[in-house]
Image (cartoon, rainbow, N blue to C red):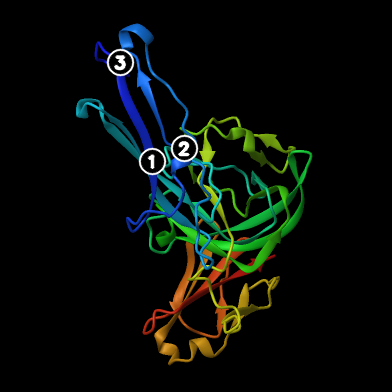
Amino acid sequence: SNLDNNAQNVNYSYRIFNSNGSVVNADYSSIEWSDFVLPFIENGVYTKNSNVVLIYPIAPLLDSNQFIVKQWIRGDDAAVSDSISFVQSFSNYYAYDDGTPEAGYGITPAESKMALHFSLNHKDTLRAIDIFFNSTKERNNPNYLESFNFVIWNDNHGKPDNILYEQQMFISSEKTGHFERFYLDEPIQIAAGGIFMGTIQETDANLNIGFDGSNPQQNQLFYKTPADNWKNSEFEGSLLFRPVFGKAIHDYPDTTTAAPKSLTVAPNPNANSSRTFQILLNYSFQADEHDLKVEVFNMLGQRVYAAPFTASVTLGNVSSGIYIVRVSNYTTGYVESTKLIIQ
């Protein structure tokens, strides 16, 4: 606004800068202009649209980048000159949230499902999922371990339908209180159009995923309990749940050289009355067995067994259900977990 009593001649220009501060080469002249701005007392707030007409350059080996857009108004009188800047980010993930959780979102009981809708303009490669699990007193326990299933459903007239992909993932204490990246076992090609991604719970415990209350996107969020059909979320906000697409990620696990799974248990499922199972280790755990320990957790994260390593473990009087068996190497810090089903 021109707060002077006289009209002011102003010139508008803008520039785009790379994150290192260098100017992006472009023809900026097509959008620059000059105008007389009448006094606010006569004409009110002065408005003029200035669309930045430029395709942002992203290096061939990248699928994310960040630019600084700076715009100037320069008057004949320096007192009426001003500038404004903003950061334009292009990232390799989809996000409805602003990155800060004001609350937590979860469903009960076990086998409940949560699905978030995304729409792709072009086919792309899904490589990982970034999830913000809130910190809690229980999750601050260093022995905390919980599993969930990451799921992709097709879009059937705006609601999740058939499961296209499912992978078990684990939450531990160090994976809470921030965005944690969970990698897919293999990259998945996603076609253009609508798709749903979310979770299936294995326990009655609330997954407590971060929830942004300032960005109302509940029309994209659906839930389903075992006794009911898919419904839209009733809570205004957006889930801190971000699918990661695009080119190979620099820290993506190298599946071409990955060792076979280091830890297996048998029989699994286990139906014997003594709850006895055998632990089989491959070369990743080659060490003096005195350096190893075995722990077993239920789906509430409670430890039901802990002892120095033995190849045969008897749990005794435990309930039927799903358990997590974890073997740790005291010397190297190597840890691996697997699922055990007690029938």
CA gap, disc 2 to disc 1?
Answer: 8 Å
Residue depicted at 75% across the width and 54% down the height: 163
Q: Which residue is mark 3?
A: 7
Measured from the top left, where is residue 295 in percent x and y?
Answer: 48, 72
In terms of depth relative to the viewer, which is nearer, 136 or 256?
256
In terms of depth relative to the viewer, which is nearer, 280 or 117?
117
Q: Which residue is mark 2?
A: 31
Vertical position of residue 6 compared to residue 203: above or below:
above
Secondary structure at numbered mark 1: strand
Secondary structure at numbered mark 3: loop
Task: Say if mark 2 contacts mark 1, CB within 8 Å.
Answer: yes
Q: Amino acid at mark 3?
A: Ala
Mark nearer the N terminus (2 vs 1): 1
Q: Which residue is mark 1?
A: 14
**Residue 236 visible, this angle:** yes
**Residue 135 visible, this angle:** no
